[in-house]
Each structure stands twice: as C-alpha cells, then as structure tokens.
Image (spheres, grey):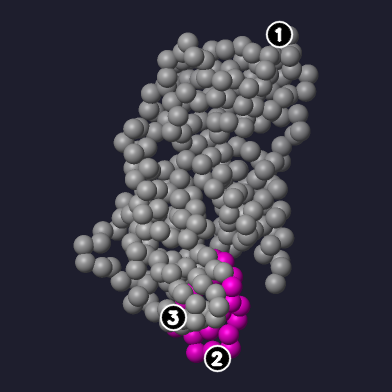
Amino acid sequence: MPHLCVMCLLWFAVPDMQSAPAVITALVGDVRIIRQKDTVEIAAHQLDHLFDGDSIVTGDGRATVLFRTGTFTAIKQHTAMLVTLLDADMIHAGQAVLDTDMETFARLFREASDAENHSLETIMAIGQDSSTMTIHAPGNTALCSDRPDILWGHVPGANWYAVTIEHRGQILNDIATTDTFLPYPTQHDSLGAGSYVLRVIAFHNNDSLNGRIRQFKVLTAEKIESVERCIEDIESKSPDSYTARLLSAMVYERYGLKTEAIDVYQVLVMEQPVPYLVRTLALLYAQVGMPHAAHQYYELYRLRIQQP
C-alpha cells in the first residue's frame, strides 16, 4: 500500500466516529458497497465514505481507496475488501505524521457539519453590487511568483486606475493605468518572500469611484521546494489521475496556494460535480475575493446536496 509524503498529507488522530476511516477517491465500472452487517449491495460513487465494517466490492470495475492516514490502495476487478479501523489508523514502522492541523485533508473524511454549512451560508449571504470592482488576480492567496501580474474587472464610469503594492506600510509600486490588466513592470524589482497589500482604485478624472484591497503572500524558496516535493511524491506513488489531482489540490491548499488549488478542483468538478468538491470551490472563491464565482458554485452545491 503506497504512502504519501509524510510532510504533505499524512494525518492521524484518535478515531472520530464522525470521521470515516476511508474514502473512495476514484472508480471505474461496476463498484459497490456493502454497509457493515447489511447484505445489500449499493452502487458506489466518487468520494463515498467507507466506515468500519463496510466492504467495497468490484465486479468489472476498479477503485482507489484513500485512508485517513494518507495511504491508499488500488482495488482491481472482481475483488472484495473489508474496511476496518485497524487498517485505517495503523501507523507503520518509521512512518511520521503531519501536524493535526491538516484540515484540508481531514475534512475529506467527514460530512460538513450544520455549523460549517451555516458558516458557508453566512459567507454567501454577503452580496456584491455589480458596480463594485473585482480583483481577479492575485487574490487573497499565497503565490510562488515574485512578479505577479494584476487583473481586475472594469468599473463603470472609470477612465483610469491607481495600482499600488505595499509591504509593511511601504509603497513599493505605484502605477496609473487605463487598462484592467497590468503585467508586473519589467523595470521594477521582484518582490521578496513575505506579505503584501495590493490596492486598486478606480477613478473618473480626479474623482475616486471605488476600489479593492487584496492581501497576498509570496512564498519562500524553501516553501516552494516543499510544495514541489509533495507533488513529486504523490506522482511517484502512481495513483490514478483523479486521486493524484485531488491530493495535489490539497497540497496547494495546505500551503495557501488557493489559485492553484482552484484550477485543479475545477478540473475535478468538470469530471464529476461531487458536492464536497463544489463546496470547496465555493469556499476558495470566497476566500480569494471572487464572490460571483463563489455564489455560482454555492448554488451548484445546494442543488447537488438536494439530489438523491
């Protein structure tokens, strides 16, 4: 059974009855689940939880099962596998664990609580006027690039924009432009690792209309190398492509690279709009500061959870 990078996705905690020991990350063909002592087989779906005593049975299908310790197993055709807490929570010799702060991984193994859904509803209740500016990039996120391009939406009535990047109260870049896309100026120094504030203000002549602020962080070279090692480690274990992308998206989330995570989750949702993934996209879009996209995925999430 392959083990994922111990610094990336391994997660261990005292077994939680609300947390499933395993989850089906990918399946093709005829795959079924027998719940605990039940004798009735039900069709399996992507990201279905597997609990202690459940069995997963493949006919002419195949599946990948991810355990909450960060290990996964590929199940071939015409195979039955019993899921037990012992298997799910076994820590193998020499296997370290990640900080229990690995929320991006842990939440995959549990249903969203009423409190979490209520929090999501509260976030989505915040509307946005169509005349209000939206900064598309960079959002409230971490970045690998130290020369980020800036993209925002046009504000009706505006004929120019003031763009500034600040670091610890010091203005590093101060640019006026009539466009809504600003490549990082070649004549300006690259941004070092650290936290920055981006301000974009719309003007009509000398009158300011409205603007937006985004806070982003440029990762250190060491953090970027850690991300790359995690992705390489996942790929070296040769999971199916769906599981590999899912785990990669979690790594990006883990390091605050929300834009990269969004890109991967969108590909997964296009393949199969599983409620967990749709909900994750709604939250990420809200966090980076793109409420329109967040609302679109939130409405899709509500639609998906209402379907049987």
- Residue 118, visible in the rendered structure: no
| Vertical position of residue 287 compared to residue 106: above or below | above
Q: Residue 101 location, x and y as percent?
A: 38, 53
What residue did someone put label 2 on? 39
Q: Residue 213 location, x and y as percent?
A: 57, 27
Q: Residue at x 67, y 17 (%)?
A: 179
Segment colored magenta: 29-53
**Element on which disc 2 rests:** loop
Q: Residue at x 21, y 62 (%)?
A: 94
Whether pointer 1 and pointer 2 mark residues with C-beta atoms closer than 8 Å, the reply is no
Whether the magenta-drawn stretch holds residue 271 is answered as no
Q: Amino acid at mark 1?
A: Asn
Looking at marks 3 and 1 on the same chain, the residue that comes earlier in the sequence is marked by: 3
In this view, the residue farthest toward the right is 157
What residue did someone put label 3 on? 81
Q: Residue 104 location, x and y as percent?
A: 46, 54
Whether the magenta-drawn stretch holds residue 38 is answered as yes
Q: Amino acid at mark 2?
A: Thr
| Vertical position of residue 61 compared to residue 289: above or below | below
Mark 3 vs mark 2, CA separation in Å:
14 Å
Q: Quadrant of the C terminus?
A: bottom right
Q: Residue 285 location, x and y as percent?
A: 60, 43
Q: Quadrant of the N terminus?
A: bottom left
Q: Amino acid at mark 3?
A: Met
Q: Residue at x 26, y 68 (%)?
A: 92
Q: Residue 237's image quarter?
A: bottom left
| Vertical position of residue 248 compared to residue 68: above or below | above
Between label 1 and label 2, give the one nearer the viewer: 2
161 relative position to 204: left or right: left
| Vertical position of residue 121 compared to residue 127: above or below | below
